[in-house]
Amino acid sequence: MTQVEVDVVVVGLGPGGERAAAALARAGLEVVGVEMHLVGGECPYYGCIPTKAMVRASNALAEARRAGDLAGEVDVRADWSVVAPRVAEAARNWDDARPTAALEDAGVRVVRGRGRLDGPGRVVVGDDIFLARRGVILDPGTAPADLSIPGLRETKPLTNRDIVRLSDAPASLIVIGGGPIGCELAEVFARFGTAVTVLEVGPRLLSREEPEASAVIAEVFAREGIDARAAVRIDHVDRVADGVTVTLADGVVHAREILVAAGRSPNLDGLGLESVGATVTHGTVAVDDRMRAADGVWVLGDVVGHGAFTHVSVYQADIAVADLLTPDAGPNAEYHAVGRVTFTDPEVGSVGLTEQQAREQGLDVRVATVSVPASTRGWLHGPGGDGVVKLVAADLPGATDPAASVLVGATVVGPMGGEVLSMLTLAVHTRIPLTTLAGMHYAFPTFHRDVLFAVQQLLDR
């Protein structure tokens, strides 16, 4: 084995690791970045980026089909062969040459292979040992979960890594998982003519979101012909001559293909966290508010447990970099206003606490909801304008004036819901009083004006 001394070793070049490695190299440190798959991680090749190209295509179909109710007759013919090359382009044809070159141009030495900790400041990659003078940053990411459903593995189901590379839309598809990934992909393929069945073991679709959001999506799915079932029990899965069958507690479902979109597994096996004294509980690495898991070890991304989102990983990378360069001088991580968007149609944007989470924390909660279709912009929008705005407010600890209540959570379901969310993310993050929100100007007629009506409801209670 060869030993090489460097300043920092970054193991895992997903969004956070990639950002941290480049920033540290630009700061003048000698940086080695280790990656066994693709530089950039899951998001640009199999997640956020290619799937949004698919969503954009399916939304264009939906809008064209709504034209009959709004503008005149349109002949719409779905064709996945138009979509597939755009998805490949969005995913850089699953080639990481460009981001790898960008890292190298920034001064990072990119090493291919599986990296593992072997004690403080020691990272082993194949036959090489890298000795980190300043520290090690880990961004190991996750992989599609291996569900313990009898027969599932033998059917060789599709995962998100397979579905984005399809050259044709399947005639029929069973989606196991009614979370964000499952719901987005179910709607995409249904709009391209695929007969889709969604099987969710939880009580409802998008079970981590507000019940009102789940209800809107369930209603839209039913209207679009998607057979979405919640609270199901899957007994076993079998590969048959013409596809796949899934045996449920109350019947059998058949389709040409099956997609697993339920959960992710942390890539922690063999990482060597025990060699530095890091604590791992139920697949989550314990870190402090500067992303430190142990002396000289920072951990980022999904495995930290604050949301499997690209933007969270990048946020954490900035905090870790600041701490590594100037210990204890930079910002601390905060997670009270983490935004997230599910890119169904309508979009589901959420930030902060749900009503249930706020009540479980013992907060004195007030809630307001506004129907998007009932608003002026929603009525004008017409078809495709389903949605709801839900705000969760509470008093800050020690507050004595009810008028000084702030938003602790918010959900926007509707056209461009993820964009409307931006103002609510700011409100939750900076704890703007409801009275201030009520006194703002809200352009008319807009979807974001529904926020004003919801705020006024809160102040009237």
Image: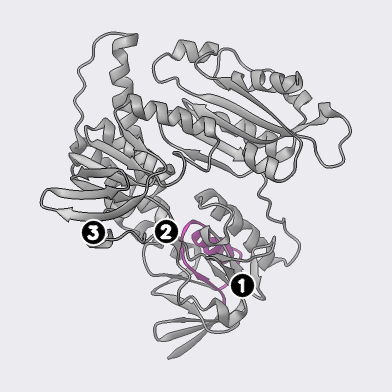
Q: Is mark 2 on a helix, strand or loop?
A: loop
**Residue 41 image label:** 2
Seen from the viewer's position, the closer of residues 102 and 309 is 309
Real-space CA distance between mark 1 and mark 2, rounded to the nearest whole angstrom: 24 Å
Amino acid carrying mark 2 in the image = Gly
Q: Residue furthest bottom?
A: 1
| Residue on which disc 3 sits | 156
**For the residues bearing labels 1 and 2, Cβ distance under 8 angstroms:** no
Q: Give the range drawn in magenta.
A: 7-30
| Residue on which disc 1 sits | 279
Real-space CA distance between mark 2 and mark 3, rounded to the nearest whole angstrom: 23 Å
**First of labels 1, 2 by sequence position:** 2
Q: Quarter holding the N terminus?
A: bottom left
Residue under the point 31% across and 36% down: 188
**Residue 207 image label:** none
Q: Is residue 303 left or right of residue 221?
A: right
Residue under the point 74% across and 37% down: 431
The image quadrant that residue 98 belongs to is bottom left
> Residue 30 at x, y = what percent?
55, 73
Amino acid carrying mark 1 in the image = Thr
> Residue 262 at x, y = what percent?
40, 51
Q: Residues within 10 Å of mark 2 (few under 14, many from 20)?
A: many
